[in-house]
Image (tube, rainbow, N blue to C red):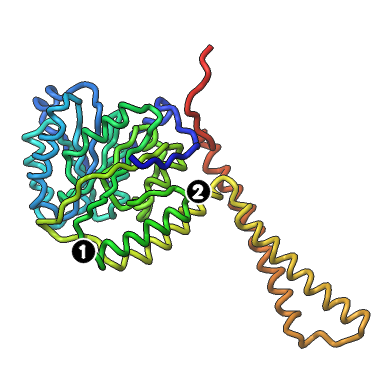
């Protein structure tokens, strides 16, 4: 087990468990008779986004049933149909009638994996939240073992899977993934061997602190660390894809870099944006002002003509751009307060409080 711990605090569960209602999500629940047989308390929520995986769904549900039922843990399986164009929707309806613990969510269109995961997180009710892909490359048989790791050590908040024996093509999947893992680890400071492994287990308060936008699902461990998670990495089984087509390609490398810039900014400057914009702006103003002062001295003391000198334009430009960045930093600070204060959001999180 490879640890990658973050010292940041987590939030208390009772302040975080708000189920978001989204007009873009239609929840299809099982019949009333099946719902009556469902357990009152849920220990584990398994969230899986699916897109055009109709051929894999029956086997996926059967494997999860075989892995989880013998453990005696109460669980729910949330399969999020991310606007599939095949028969995934129909297959989910049929499977939901057979298994009371299956809760399908159908997004109104294809939003992408991050939004599909967020929809699943918003509807999760378990103390633990498990994620994995629906292509059967992640093996559900690993879930009980990862849950046991969280049970054994209360200090661990996230167990992240590591596909040490990855069953994918070398040049199109393994090499880009290796480079991306190195880059993300270096930039975020959360060092993992495998950011791309979808098989992960979280304590619910960590998930409650996350909001996924765009394609931030690749950076969930870094975002979880920012939310206060203490993370360990555990090798897991990985199988080659036998049905369906991969939804990923080499083109995602550029998107990873762009998203990584945002993640780095968010982790470092979310609560103090004026330090990001203002620092650069102040530096530009000082350099521009120094150039203009030098030109002023050259004009007034030496009597040289400065009207056609490029440094005059450069100094003026640097001062103007610097002032704009300073103003942007001030506006960003105001927006940060607008984000936190009207709804009572806290800019900190507590791991625990002292008892009297």
Q: In the drawing, does residue 273 fall left or right of residue 17?
A: right
> What numbered label is drawn on residue 208?
none
Mark 1 or 2 closer to N-term? 1
Would residue 204 be visible to someone looking at this image? yes
Callout 2 crowding tier (Cα within 10 Å): few <14, some 14–19, many ≥20: some
Q: Residue at x 54, y 37 (%)?
A: 347
Kindly identify which residue carries mark 1: 169
Q: Quadrant of residue 214?
A: bottom left
Kindly identify which residue carries mark 2: 267
Task: Give the number of callouts.
Answer: 2
**x then y, percent, for residue 112:** 28, 55
Front in this rendered view, residue 98 or 75: 75
Front in this rendered view, residue 180 or 83: 180
Q: Residue at x 18, y 22 (%)?
A: 39
User: Is label 1 or label 2 in front?
Assistant: 1
Q: Residue at x 50, y 29 (%)?
A: 350
Query: Element at badge 1?
Result: loop
**x then y, percent, for residue 156:** 38, 33
Indicate whether 245 appears above or below 107: below
Query: Element at badge 2?
Result: helix
Front in this rendered view, residue 97 or 277: 277
**x then y, percent, for residue 61:** 11, 40
Q: Quadrant of residue 319?
A: bottom right
């Amino acid at each position: 087990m490879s640890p990658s711990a973050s010292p940041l605090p987590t939030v208390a569960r009772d302040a975080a468990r708000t189920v978001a209602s989204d007009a873009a999500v239609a929840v299809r629940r099982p019949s009333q008779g099946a719902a009556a047989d469902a357990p009152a308390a849920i220990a584990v929520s398994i969230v899986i986004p699916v897109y055009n995986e109709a051929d894999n769904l029956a086997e996926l549900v059967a494997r999860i049933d075989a892995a989880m039922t013998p453990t005696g843990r109460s669980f729910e399986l949330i399969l999020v149909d991310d606007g599939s164009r095949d028969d995934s929707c129909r297959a989910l309806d049929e499977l939901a009638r057979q298994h009371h613990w299956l809760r399908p969510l159908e997004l109104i269109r294809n939003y992408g994996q991050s939004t599909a995961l967020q929809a699943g997180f918003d509807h999760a009710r378990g103390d633990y939240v498990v994620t994995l892909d629906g292509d059967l490359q992640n093996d559900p048989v690993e879930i009980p073992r990862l849950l046991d790791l969280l049970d054994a050590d209360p200090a661990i908040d996230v167990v992240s899977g590591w596909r040490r024996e990855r069953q994918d093509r070398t040049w199109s999947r393994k090499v880009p993934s290796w480079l991306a893992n190195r880059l993300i680890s270096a930039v975020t400071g959360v060092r993992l061997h495998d950011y791309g492994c979808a098989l992960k287990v979280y304590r619910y308060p960590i998930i409650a602190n996350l909001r996924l936008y765009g394609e931030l699902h690749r950076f969930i461990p870094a975002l979880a660390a920012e939310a206060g998670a203490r993370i360990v990495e555990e090798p897991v089984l990985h199988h080659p894809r036998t049905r369906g087509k991969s939804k990923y390609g080499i083109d995602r490398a550029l998107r990873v870099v762009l998203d990584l810039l945002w993640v780095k900014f968010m982790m470092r400057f979310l609560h103090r944006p004026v330090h990001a914009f203002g620092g650069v702006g102040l530096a530009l103003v000082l350099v521009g002002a120094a150039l203009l002062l030098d030109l002023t001295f050259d004009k007034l003391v030496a009597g040289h003509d400065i009207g056609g000198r490029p440094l005059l334009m450069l100094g003026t430009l640097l001062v103007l751009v610097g002032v704009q960045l300073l103003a942007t930093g001030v506006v960003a600070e105001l927006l940060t307060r607008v984000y936190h204060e009207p709804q009572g959001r806290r800019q900190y999180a507590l791991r625990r409080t002292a008892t009297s």
